[in-house]
Each structure stands twice: as structure tokens, then as C-alpha cells.
Image: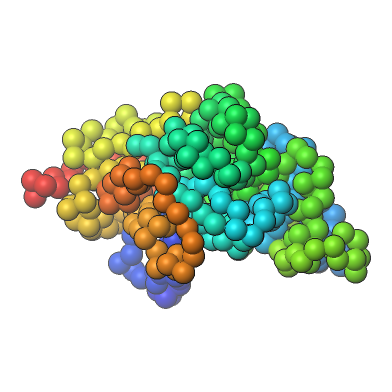
Amino acid sequence: MNRLRSKLDQDGREQADTASGPTILMNDFRRLWFDTREEILTAVDEVGQSGWFILGARVEEFEYSLARFVGRRFAVGCANGLDAIEISLRALGLEPGDRVLTTPLSAFATTLGILRAGGSPAFVDTDESGLLDLDLVETALRDDPSIKFLVPVHLFGHAIDLSKLLHLKRQFDLRVVEDCCQAIGARSGDSPVGSVGDVSALSFYPTKNLAALGDGGAVFTDDSALCKRARALRDYGQTSKYLHEELGLNSRLDEVHGAIMARAFLPKLAAWTARRAAVAARYRSEITNPQIGLVAIPPTSVSAWHLFPVRVSPVYRHNFQQHLMKHGIASGIHYPKLITDQSALRKTDFRTMSELHHARSLSEQEVSLPIHPYLTEEEVSKVTHVVNQWTGALA
Ligand SMILES: *Cc1c(COP(=O)(O)O)cnc(C)c1O
């Protein structure tokens, strides 16, 4: 039974889970379910009994707890991370055609959110860690002082250098939206991600560190006016019932998800993050295969370890993933194609403001190893063993 059970892979595609599929998964949603089932069922029952399903007490309670967790004054639940980015930029007053600096190496949704908000994306390269190179951002801002918006991404769960980001924000009077979709709980030095952005965006897509049982997202901010505007934008742009001051979205977080996240998932997030960090520490010390490179971590980052990226020669990347799969180990690529190379962008007026060498080399070399809170020590040992065993170019 269950041979045709399907599951989401890292990129959200449905995969048939046959008897021959991997046993060490990128995300183990069934282990998550069995660990949290009781709290989830209680949360759902509570919502059912309340008789209130949209924008009620559970979402409010979740928003309150989430704001405390990220160390901000306000959080506003919404439907997904893409909307969170659009809502953040629109709340900040982005006008159609405004240039927005961002990274070519991210989930496509980062750029799509900019476009959906009416912005024109402008790309600069990453550094060798895969995160936006803030020195190149500075050069781009000098080249085009009309640019007023920046969307950096805390890719892989690593925090970008927030003191540098704050410096740039002040120097160039920027509006900053931090894309924290992969990095809730990460810090740069002592500063939590999301503490420099005027508004920051989260996704609760099932693969994320803080997930929903489906889609969800949030924005967070310290500014009450931005919070108010985000609340209106997620709900048709209404500022009070049937009063519409602008054209908003339907991007509400359900009460069921508010309850599930507040009761079952958010209380576990700190422990999950600690577990991810422990797995990462083992990989970093135990993976010794000279053909496998560890991707650099920004020096100030205390990572949330959304992913564990390594580098292999592009020629042998497929072979490496096959080797893992043969031993029952799933893996992923983040991301195989730069956003600037996506055909959907051809009809937009995006701009590339630097060479994209680092981003391109990562997109050609990167492989993500399984890292999630439900990996056992034996499974981590198996992954390191199988990785170290790979002879790659020598095969
Ligand atoms: C997942 C993700 C998004 C989009 O979130 P959705 O909830 O899928 O819309 C945006 N940016 C980054 C960096 C992400 O990882």
C-alpha cells in the first residue's frame, strides 16, 4: 500500500514515492506529521468549534507570537511568500517602474514578487556564499542613484551581513525588504534576520524551516503604519469593512493555519533550528571527500540551515546525485538556472548591473544534501559515509 503516495520534492513538484524511492529525504513530512499530529488535530478542532475561519483570534495570536519570535513589533499573516514580498514592496510605496536591486540566485518568487508589485528588477552578482554581494550593491547604487529599493535574500538559511546592509540602507536612503523565507531564526552577529529591512517577508511553504500544512506567509515590521498598510493590502485593500483605499489582494492566512502554526509548529521552531545546526556541524566536520566543496558561509552568519549546499564539478554533478540516489539519499539543486536566464523574464525590463560569475558558478555546481530536523544520527552518518565514498572524477 501507499506505493503511489505522492510527496513534494524540494522544489515543490509532486513525486511518486515508490518502493524504490529514497529513504533519506530532503524533507520528511510524514515524520513531521507523526510528531505534531495531536497538537494539529487539537488546533483544527479548536477552529471548528470557534465557528470563525478567516482573520480571527487564531491568526491574531499567531501574528503576536511570530512577531515576538522574530523580535519585531508586528507580524501580518498572508497567503504565501510571493504575496509577502509583493505586499512588503507595495506597503513601502513602490511605484510602477521603480528599480529594485536583488539577486539572480534565489527562488523565482523573489523576483516575481518584485514584478507583481510593479517593480523592475535589477540584478547584481552574489559572493561565493551565494548571497547578494553588498559591495557590488554599493557600486550599482553609485552607478544609478535613482534606485531606492533593495530585496536581499538570506539564501540557504544564511544571514547576509546585516551591519553592512544597515550601512548601505542609511547611506543611500534605501527601502529594504529582507526575503527571510529560508532563514527565520538566523542571525548576523547578534542581529536577527529581518531587523534591518523596513519590512521582511516569510514563507510557510511546506519545505521551509517554519512551515504550514500547505501555503502560508507573513510580513513583519516595527512600523505601525507599514503594518496597517500590509493588513489592508492582504484583504482587498480595505482599511475597514467595505472601505477600499487601494487595490489589494486576497492574501489572507486561514484561522486553521494560524492555529496550527501557533500551537504545533512555532513552539518547536527553536529546537528544530538547533537540530538543523547540529546536523550541519556534523556534515561540516565529517565530509572530507576532496571532490566535495563546502559552500562558504558569510562570516557573521549564525545560520538557520534551511539547506546544506555543497559544490561538485559541473561535469560530475549528475553522477554525484545518482550515487546518492543509488544509496537511498535524496538531494536537490538550488538553483539550476539563474533568474536572469528564465524565459519568463524576457518580456520584462529587467537589468543586470554586474557580471554574474559567482551566482552562475553556484548554479552549475551546487548540490543540496538532506538537512531537516527529523534526520537521525544514523542517517547523518550514512549521508557522510556515502558522500565520502564517492570517487567522482576518478570513477
Ligand atoms: C519559498 C521562497 C519564496 C516564495 O514563497 P512561497 O510561499 O512559495 O510563495 C520566496 N523567496 C524565497 C527565498 C523562498 O525560498
Q: Is residue 340 above or below residue 293?
A: below
Q: Is residue 36 visible?
A: no
Where residue 126 sits in the image (x, y, percent)? 40, 41
Q: Quadrant for the N terminus, please.
A: bottom left
Query: Dividing the picture into quarters, in which one does residue 187 lie?
Result: top right
User: How far from the left and from the top, in percent, is residue 139?
Assistant: 45, 35
**Residue 375 pos. (x, y %):** 43, 45
Q: Can residue 349 be seen? A: yes
How many numbered discs sit on the rendered protein? 0
Using the image as rendered, state which of residue 281 and residue 191 is in the foreground. 191
Residue 80, compared with residue 193, is above or below; it is below
Asked if residue 191 is positioned above or below residue 89 in the image, the reply reads above
Q: Which coloring applies here?
A: rainbow
Q: Residue at x 56, y 50 (%)?
A: 100
In the rendered structure, the answer to whether residue 8 lies left or right of residue 394 reads: right
Residue 309 relative to residue 6: left or right: left
| Percent coordinates x, y for residue 200 in the rendering | 64, 44
Which residue occupies 78% across, 40% down? 223
Q: Residue at x 22, y 57 (%)?
A: 318
Instruction: State which quadrant residue 37 falls in.
Output: bottom right
Residue at image point 56% right, 40% down: 145
Please tell me which residue lies in front, 157 or 349: 349
Query: Measured along the vertical axis of the image, is residue 47 above or below residue 27?
Result: below
Identify which residue, 132 or 26, lies in the foreground. Answer: 132
